[in-house]
Image (tube, rainbow, N blue to C red):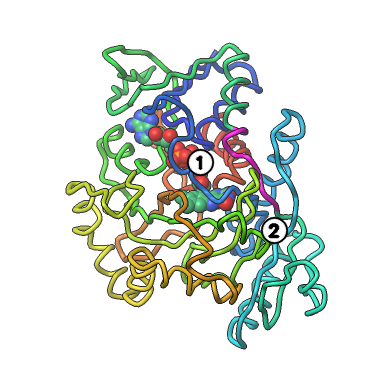
Amino acid sequence: MKKVAIVGGGLVGLAVGYKLSLLGGYKVTIFEKESQQGMHQSGRNSGVIHCGLSYEPKSLKARLAHDGTKQMKAFCEQNNVNFDICGKVMVASDNEEVKLLEGVARKGELNGLKGLRYLTQEELKQREPFVKAQKALLVPEEGIIDYKGVMKELVRLIKEGGHDVFFNSKIEKVKELENEIVVFSNDKERSFDLLVNCAGLYSDVTYNKLTGNKRPLRIVPFRGEYMKLKPEFEHLVNHLVYPVPNPKYPFLGVHFTRMIGGTKELGPNAVFALKREGYTNKDISLSEMSDSVFYKGFHKFILKNFGFAMGEFASSLSAQSFINKAKKLIPDVELHMVEKGVAGVRAQAMDSDGALVMDFRIEKEGKQVHVLNAPSPGATSSLAIADYVIENYIN
Ligand SMILES: Cc1cc2nc3c(=O)[nH]c(=O)nc-3n(C[C@H](O)[C@H](O)[C@H](O)COP(=O)(O)OP(=O)(O)OC[C@H]3O[C@@H](n4cnc5c(N)ncnc54)[C@H](O)[C@@H]3O)c2cc1C
């Protein structure tokens, strides 16, 4: 029996634990620093199933989003978790965006998406009467899901399989010996054969603390703030309405989302966060802020992307600036129709040249496997990421 320690009880860590538990021959222990699963990215996202539309063909993101979508739907069906394949409309607002949208559609086809088609203005009006588009692409396989419900089920199934999920258990120290890796948590030492780091916003810090090696890349936190439509204005959108993503960035742009619970949200923006788990612009950690600000990659990023960074920052400080982004899709939306919503922080890896690392990134060091970059669509892809990690680094 191989003993595997997993750091992090978000969707990725839980999915790795669940998949190992199904294989047999493994004893899994998940360590989560919070008092319950999914308190960070996995429980604070848009709740969308992204099946691989705009990702670089053959990239891990494209492959694992496609496979992950199928697996996520099947998991929800088997375990009575709510999801709804309502489809999404991606909107081009001008000639330049039309070209980008056509590029996205071509990528989607290469990535194996089925049923992609452009809507006529009449069809768009029927589906989303308030959306204004020069061209609109229907993506019928995408949908919305209850990721918190998925995580609750994953924890239940892992525990029922005889494995452990320990909460309030932060891992910051291990000792790697010839035949074992000793993991320290809450004054206890436990011995394992292998450790998998799925610490999300702290994946790079955890890598450094557990291996003693310099971080190969840096997590730079980008907060995503949401607003929600007041109930009397929820008719402005029916399902999912997205702008064409800017190919330079991994962020999808402010979109409209019908959440699985029925509320209609707008967002998220992408604002440099002054704290990794800081969910408002008043949350500041000097050490974490310095960690990003004094990183040479960050300087290069800001120099190259000053306009983008300022535009996103403005949308955090000014609600009107936020609404202006949403107005591109639905011109009728006004400030008085929305109220403040939730926020999440993306763990986005950056390299020392200031490039945002677009694809998922996993590395192995001795008896440790590190999931260093698993941003969106990491939730959709989590079950497929787990298979990939197990096939390539554990089994
Ligand atoms: C605003 C936003 C919107 C998004 N929208 C979508 C979407 O619609 N669809 C989609 O597919 N993806 C989306 N994503 C991306 C998706 O949420 C992430 O890719 C996914 O949740 C990553 O899961 P994770 O387990 O790697 O990280 P997390 O969920 O952040 O989990 C990491 C866990 O590790 C724990 N941890 C950290 N350090 C330690 C330690 N030392 N010891 C013990 N525990 C530790 C943390 O407490 C945390 O629970 C979005 C993300 C954000 C932020």
Q: Which quadrant of the figure has residue 110?
A: bottom right
Q: Magenta segment range? A: 143-150
Q: Return the residue nearer the eye: 166 or 258.
A: 258
Q: Quadrant of the N terminus?
A: top right
Residue at image point 23% right, 49% down:
284
**Residue that numbered label 1 is attached to:** 42
Give left or right: position of 375 versus 148: left
141 or 110, which lies in front? Answer: 141
Q: Name the residue at 39% across, 68% down.
A: 315
Which residue is found at the position 48% from the left and 47% from the top? 374
Callout 1 crowding tier (Cα within 10 Å): few <14, some 14–19, many ≥20: many
**Given the image, on which type of amino acid does mark 2 rest?**
His
Q: Is mark 1 within 8 Å of ligand 1?
A: yes
In this rendered view, identify the residue nearer to me: 131 or 154: 131
- Residue lying furthest bottom in this view? 95
The residue pinned by badge 2 equals 239
Question: Which x, y percent locates residue 104?
Answer: 65, 71
Percent position of residue 346, x then y: 42, 51
* Ligand 1 is within 8 Å of the C-beta of the residue at disc 2: no
Q: Give the distance between the C-alpha atoms of the residues marked 2 and 1, in whole angstroms.
A: 21 Å
Tell me whether circle 2 and circle 1 mark residues in contact (CB < 8 Å). Answer: no
Residue 52 in the image, given as x and y percentages of width and height: 65, 57
Q: Amino acid at mark 1?
A: Ser
Eyeballing the image, is 308 above or below 223? below
